[in-house]
Amino acid sequence: MKKSPFFELLNRRAGKDFDDFLASSVLDQDYIDWNDFALPNDYGNAEEEYFALRNGCAIFDVSPMRKYRISGEEAGDFLDKMLTRPVSDAESNRGIYVIFCNEDGTLKDDSILYKFSEIDYLLMPSDIDHESYFKSLAERFHFHGLSIVDCTDQWQGVAFQGPHSAAVLHNMGYEGVDQLKPYEVRRFPFVKDQIHIARMGFTADLGYECWLRPELCREFMAKIESVRESMSIDLPGYGLSVLEACRLEGGFIVAGWDFATEVDSEPGFERNPFEVGLGWLVKLDAGDFVGRDALLNKKQEGSQYLIRSFQTADPRELEDGVAIYSNINNEEIAVGSVNCSGWSWGLERKIGNASILSDYINTKDHWIVLDGQPVEITLSRGSFLNLARRHQVPAPLA
């Protein structure tokens, strides 16, 4: 299992280094394998990490994300063919949320795409190795004027998230970071090199992602330690538990947890973009792309499922796939199932995403069954919170 260069900076377990953590932890219980890196559920105390993020600033290690540099004269045309929305005509120095589908219209993955120029892109799906698929697609459609390179280990990164994230980066010397618009990326000089800072995140809060070359990590961590002292701010790391809580509060989806993928395959859990709230990313009138014909049909036919958020006051663990019931004509009917769930310390409730059969989308009074007893849940559409600072320009520096 690989150790991220930022692990010790974020770790708060007294007397335990990375090797001690692995030796005393259980895979998929205390940490997950994220592209051969160990991502902890927490770095010592998940609840403290959550409130540090929502009330100040906390740091997430994004280094393990898959990264593909797609460049060359045909890079834009290739991406337009693969993705469900055109990107070749988008502004440079922007991040773009994108999805790509299988030929049958089911989702293959979602990703952030950074466009640096007309011939230079960086695609960041979370954890699926798509390199062979990308190259086979380029060959199939006769794209020869491009390069596709897995550069996962050539970029390290951390995300600063929370209301004080702009102030932290400003005090680290990155003047003007507060002027970045959501999804904008800018290069800043750093140690005779550059660091890329994007106004981006997965917490439904104000946040930034910082990307740099591995050899710059030591100097970057020294700047973090310095600003901790100068601002008298904790800046803890946060792990998977807090990330899950924050993304569910924001109503975000995750491949493998909200729809099946080739890596996390589950028959019947395949979903098309319209079924998980991502129809706005499908531009059927913008030219041909992989899966377009199938998506045209699916849009005309209507969705079999629709995604909804849910909450319950019951704190017990929920198994993914637990059935959701409703009373229809005095009969108990399974109307959907739980995709994934997590505890929200801010809402003091268990929250999650659910797949609901579209025929039953307007039903009232829903419940699940735990330990043989019905437990009431409430379905809703969209996010549980809408923080103005997430979109505010300039971002707050106090």
Image: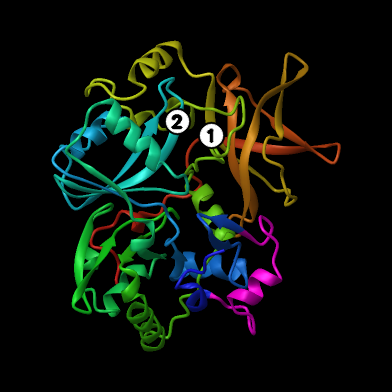
Q: Does residue 346 show up? A: no
Task: Name above or below for residue 21 compared with residue 315.
Answer: below
Of the numbered discs in the image, which one, if any, rests on residue 359?
A: none
Circle 2: residue type: Leu
Q: Residue 287 magenta-drawn?
A: no
Q: Which residue is mark 2?
A: 107
Q: Which residue is mark 1?
A: 259
Task: Name above or below for residue 112 compared with residue 55.
Answer: above
Q: Main secondary structure of the magenta part?
A: loop
Judge left or right: residue 43 versus residue 62. right
Q: Residue 16 magenta-drawn?
A: yes
Residue 138 x, y percent position in the rendering: 28, 33
Residue 259 x, y percent position in the rendering: 53, 34
Depth check: 55 or 110 in front?
110
Quarter holding the N terminus is bottom right
Circle 1: residue type: Phe
Which residue lies most toward the right here? 372
Q: How many marks?
A: 2
Which mark is first along the chain, 1 or 2?
2
Residue 298 x, y percent position in the rendering: 43, 16
Contact between labelled residues 1 and 2, with CB atoms less than 8 Å apart: yes
Residue 222 x, y percent position in the rendering: 37, 84
Q: Quadrant of residue 230?
A: bottom left
Secondary structure beneath label 1 = loop
**Segment colored magenta:** 11-31
Quarter holding the C terminus is bottom left
Q: Residue at x 62, y 73 (%)?
A: 44
Real-space Cα separation, disc 2 to disc 1, in angstroms: 8 Å
Depth check: 173 or 257 in front?
257
